[in-house]
Each structure stands twice: as C-alpha cells, then as structure tokens.
Image: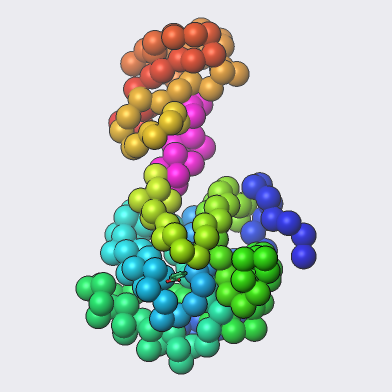
Amino acid sequence: MATLRLGDIAPDFEQESSKGKIKFHEFLGDSWGVLFSHPADFTPVCTTELGYTAKLSDEFARRGVKVIAVSVDDNESHQKWIEDINDTQGTAVDFPILADKDRKVADLYDMIHPNASTTVTVRSVFIIDPAKKIRLIITYPASTGRNFNEILRVIDSLQLTDSHSVATPVNWEDGQDVIIVPSLTDPEVLKQKFPKGYTEIRSYLRITPQPNK
Ligand code: BEZ
C-alpha cells in the first residue's frame, strides 16, 4: 500500500455499506466527497460525530458534497448503531457507513495505525474533489472528536480558491476577506479580477473582499 498524498487520485473500491454495495467512484459521481473513519460502532465519541455529521446534511448538500463513513464492523451492527445514533443525537443518519469488517477500505486508505491500535481505525478524513483528487487528509486520535464545522470550512476554502486567484488566511470563514495569490502581479488582471480593490500590506500580502460575495 502506497502512502496517499494530496493530489493523488482517491483509490476506488467496492464495499458493502449500510445503504447497500458502494462502488466508490460511481457513488461520488461529479460531487465532492468526504470519506471519514472512526474507531468502531457503539463507541461514544463516534456516536456524537456521526450524529453531528447527519445534522450537517443540508450544509454538505449545498456545497455538492457526498459524505461516507468507514467502520470496521459489519452491516448488522451498523443498522443497530444507526438507530442508537438517531435516538441519542436526535437526528437521522442519511449517509452510508461502509461495513469494512475485512478492512479493505481501512487498509487502502491507511486508516489503521498499528502503533496506536492494531484493531480499530484512527479518525481519518479525506476530502476528495470532483476530479477524484485528494485535497485534504487529516488524522485525529481516537479520544478526540473532530470538528466537522472545520471540514465545511475547508470545503468552502477549496471551492473558492479553485475558482478565484485567492487563498484564505488563518481562521478564515466564508464571507471574510481573502488573500490574493502572490503569483498574480499584472495590474490589468488584478483590476479585472478584483474590481472591489485590495489593500497591499506587503507586496506578497494583499487582502481583498471575498470575490464571489
Ligand atoms: C470513542 O468513542 O471512539 C472513544 C472513546 C474514548 C477513548 C477512545 C475512543
């Protein structure tokens, strides 16, 4: 198994899930994707993470993102756990959870870190773009629940920076000022791309209102 890196094509797979067999690339279609693993079914932190992710369903849909979870348990367990998640978190899990009992996906995406645990997956997140390229990889320890608002924030940044010549600064949130990429220096192009103007703090640090707002 080769190490996955940003810019790599997300490996395709076929695996059972709580919503039937998934062919990953087919499932993604032209959408963005978030593939995320967690240690196991019926564990407390994961229950809160999957419940919160279900509550963000409209936010993911608005951004054209399909969400899919990985758990190294079987489908029967998933179905029972989904009932628990819905009940305890007051939500309805509407995304598939891969039944990765044989660890096909966990191994393909290097989600088992043997020096942390030989049996369960760490908390991995992969954001995948419509060209199936991996655009973000994060890994959290089992004991720390992730911030799924941060995952939405990164998707906002990626979708903005893909279509405009900007990057997003520290702690940026959708709607806030952004940074013009340093490679853009032609004054005519700058005027055309940023009609609202910009503030030059340094030649390499130019701030402009978010162009698509
Ligand atoms: C969990 O819910 O996955 C978890 C809880 C405590 C320690 C490690 C993992």
Question: Residue at point 31% right, 83% down?
Answer: 84
Look at the magenta stretch and give its main secondary structure: helix
**Image coordinates for residue 193, horizontal then vertical, percent:** 45, 20
Q: How many numbered circles are shown?
A: 0
User: Over which residues does the magenta segment extend?
Assistant: 154-167
Of the 4 image quadrants, the one containing the N terminus is: bottom right
Residue 13: which quarter of the image? bottom right
Residue ID at (45%, 44%): 154
**Left or right relative to 10: residue 210:** left
Q: Is residue 100 left or right of residue 180?
A: right
Q: Residue 55 in the image: x percent, y percent?
A: 28, 64
Picture quarter containing residue 2?
bottom right
Which residue is at 49% across, 15% downward? Answer: 205
Relative height, residue 77 to residue 6 (above, below) = below
- The C terminus is located in which quarter? top left
Q: Nearer the viewer, residue 118 or 198?
A: 118
Give how far across and how far down residue 9 sits, in percent: 67, 55
